[in-house]
């Protein structure tokens, strides 16, 4: 490539990394595996809605289940409650656990680093795209639930837990807020997954370990013997979004969730950096 | 690029994994503009050295400078000028060849987005992958992946290109193309650092060679220096009765006959000239020019530098030796390479 070639001249300034971030999102969301996971998440509210429609919605079930037949807006919320313990952590575990170890196993990690992407920038972009995935995953559940609910059930003003009634627009806003809340709750797990991902070149191991962390956290959260630990578990606030269904909104659980997750992101982000910044990349 | 600093220079470069020393005090000196062949058997520390040069692995000890800058401190400024193929290609199987290149290009903060498409197309064209650029890498053969890996190294104009075993998995035609590519890169002043365990593959295009063995750099220099380093050998065929005379004539010239082969139909063993200590082992030395003619004796002696073959012949003829054949052989680079690295499949640890 001759240096006089006009198509091959360096930028005068180093790009900040938005281009790489977009490319990372492209690789993540164009991948069949990611699409399949989002499809599976979308199936949860659809299955719930169809089941209620067919059986009439009597009987016991997760929160909000009994409300669905009166108002389709509750399908998404019910589906989130169902997905939070396993399905959402599973998909986040796959994406976060794969983030660095997956690149190592395909051999692309060394080429990214030599390109050069910069190790810190790579970690930041990987985490940022995991954040985008968390949001995409919860929104997929909510939006699929909304659509399934609108098709199969009547849609109308929602009576909140505080007894007040809000119109459909306000209810949609609340649904969006709940999606953000749930996504926020997954960020700590994403950071843990990123850290685990820097430890190994085997993506399956990192994914499994991340999912195990999520399950372990919930098991510990159920045991009264570990009560002292509960407020520090990443899953502590996962199901506390009911406070967002009050009038006025009680932000305390949202704030508690945010601080807890921020702490996990800070700790495991630092660990991931400490591990990855000096790691010999031999994959 | 005149008077440019060395493209790569290391001193005492060492890498240990636990108690095992994989790279041991390597002092590389790759001049700018050179095509440097980095040779050594598998497991001799070539790839680990390359990983340290590119900042993928940290050195246990020693200094590295690449393009005149200290590594790994100046990684971010040096690497945009370096294209690399490291230990085989690595790509996302679920993306097309072109998408893979675009992805790696996006990772380089210095590569302008506006020209990405054109640069990717040009790089694909240079390695002959234009047709396959839209296919998923999953469907690529090893040779095609190897070409894509080289295309990745060519996405931007580079001052240094590091190619680790670039001809792996390529057919003879592909190997020729890679050689041509390296020559064309070198002709524009790009320094090329190419590693291989096969001397024959890179011998023809290298200006410099470094040889690794067991983690140590056992030889380094221009290709001519390494060629000259081997000991030349004089092969002489004389009429059998004159063999003893020939040996005594050669001795004052500093030529010590180390082997002599009598003709097959030599009537008596005592006629075979055997200087002290040097056994006349029948058939131990292959005459260089076909079977020795009936009645000739083949003599072999190490041939020192600076001695003219014609002087030797003149001396022999002057002494009345019937000289029937003479040749001075230099060892091929391959012989020197094998002598330096050892033969066989044993991985040196």
Image (cartoon, rainbow, N blue to C red):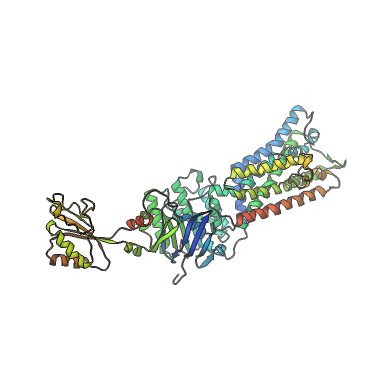
Q: Residue furthest bottom?
A: B3
- The answer to whether residue B248 is above or below residue A124 is below
Q: Residue furthest front?
A: B276
- The answer to whether residue B75 is above or below residue A43 is below
The answer, for residue A140, to whether it is visible in the render is no
- The answer to whether residue B141 is above or below residue A275 is above
Residue B333 is left or right of residue A73, and the answer is left
Q: Nearer the viewer, residue A37 or A55?
A: A37
Q: Nearer the viewer, residue A57 or A228?
A: A228
Q: Position of residue B321 (x, y in %)?
A: 13, 62
Q: Nearer the viewer, residue B251 or B188?
A: B251
> How many circles with numbers are drawn on the protein?
0
Q: Position of residue A197 (x, y in %)?
A: 62, 48
Residue A44 is left or right of residue B100, and the answer is right
Residue A203 is left or right of residue B322, and the answer is right
Q: Position of residue A169 (x, y in %)?
A: 80, 44
Q: Nearer the viewer, residue A174 or B147?
A: B147
Q: Position of residue B341 (x, y in %)?
A: 38, 55
The answer, for residue B320, to whether it is visible in the render is yes
Q: Residue furthest top?
A: A55
Quadrant where the N terminus of chain B sits is: bottom left
């Amino acid at each position: 490539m001759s240096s006089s070639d006009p198509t091959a001249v360096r930028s005068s300034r180093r790009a900040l990394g938005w281009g790489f971030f977009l490319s990372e999102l492209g690789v993540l969301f164009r991948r069949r595996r990611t699409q399949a996971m989002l499809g599976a998440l979308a199936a949860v509210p659809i299955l719930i809605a169809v089941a209620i429609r067919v059986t009439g919605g009597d009987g016991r079930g997760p929160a909000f289940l009994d409300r669905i037949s009166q108002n389709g807006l509750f399908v998404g919320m019910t589906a989130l409650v169902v997905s939070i313990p396993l399905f959402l952590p599973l998909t986040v575990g796959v994406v976060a656990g794969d983030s660095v170890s997956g690149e190592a196993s395909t051999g692309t990690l060394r080429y990214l680093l030599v390109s050069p992407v910069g190790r810190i920038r790579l970690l930041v972009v990987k985490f940022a795209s995991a954040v985008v995935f968390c949001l995409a995953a919860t929104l997929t559940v909510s939006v699929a639930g909304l659509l399934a609910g609108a098709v199969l059930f009547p849609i109308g003003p929602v009576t909140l837990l505080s007894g007040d009634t809000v119109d459909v627009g306000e209810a949609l806003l609340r649904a969006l807020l709940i999606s953000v809340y749930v996504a926020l709750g997954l960020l700590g797990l994403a950071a843990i997954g990123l850290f685990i991902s820097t430890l190994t070149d085997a993506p399956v191991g990192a994914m499994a370990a991340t999912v195990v962390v999520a399950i372990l956290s919930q098991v510990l959260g159920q045991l009264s013997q570990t009560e002292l630990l509960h407020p520090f578990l990443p899953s502590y606030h996962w199901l506390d979004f009911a406070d967002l269904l009050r009038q006025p909104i009680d932000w305390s659980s949202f704030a508690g969730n945010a601080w807890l997750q921020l702490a996990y992101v800070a700790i495991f982000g630092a660990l991931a950096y400490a591990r990855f910044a000096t790691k010999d990349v031999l994959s | 690029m005149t008077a440019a600093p060395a493209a790569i220079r290391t001193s005492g470069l060492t890498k240990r994994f636990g108690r095992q020393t994989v790279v041991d005090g390597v002092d590389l000196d790759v001049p700018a503009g050179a095509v440097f062949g980095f040779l050594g058997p598998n497991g001799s520390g070539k790839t680990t050295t390359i990983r340290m040069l590119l900042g993928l692995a940290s050195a246990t000890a020693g200094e590295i400078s690449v393009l005149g800058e200290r590594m790994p401190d100046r990684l971010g400024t040096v690497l945009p000028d370096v294209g690399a193929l490291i230990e085989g290609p690595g790509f996302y199987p679920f993306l097309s060849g072109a998408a893979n290149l675009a992805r790696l290009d996006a990772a380089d903060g210095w590569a302008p987005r506006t020209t990405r498409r054109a640069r990717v197309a040009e790089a694909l064209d240079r390695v002959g992958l234009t047709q396959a650029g839209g296919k998923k890498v999953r469907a690529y053969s090893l040779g095609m992946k190897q070409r894509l890996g080289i295309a990745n190294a060519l996405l931007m104009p580079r001052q240094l290109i590091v190619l680790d075993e670039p001809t792996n998995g390529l057919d003879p035609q592909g190997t020729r193309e890679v050689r041509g590519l390296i020559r064309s890169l070198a002709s524009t002043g790009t320094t090329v650092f190419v590693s291989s365990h096969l001397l024959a593959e890179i011998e023809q295009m290298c200006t410099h060679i470094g040889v690794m063995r067991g983690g140590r750099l056992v030889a380094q220099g221009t290709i001519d220096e390494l060629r000259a380093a081997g000991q030349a050998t004089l092969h002489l065929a004389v009429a059998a009765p004159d063999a003893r005379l020939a040996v005594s004539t050669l001795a004052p010239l500093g030529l010590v006959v180390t082997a002599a082969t009598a003709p097959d139909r030599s009537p008596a063993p005592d006629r075979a000239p055997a200087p002290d200590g040097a056994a006349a082992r029948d058939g131990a030395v292959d005459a260089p020019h076909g079977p020795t003619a009936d009645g000739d004796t083949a003599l072999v002696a190490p041939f020192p530098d600076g001695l003219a073959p014609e002087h030797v012949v003149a001396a022999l003829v002057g002494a009345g030796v019937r000289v029937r054949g003479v040749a001075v052989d230099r060892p091929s680079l391959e012989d020197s390479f094998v002598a330096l690295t050892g033969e066989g499949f044993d991985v040196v640890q």
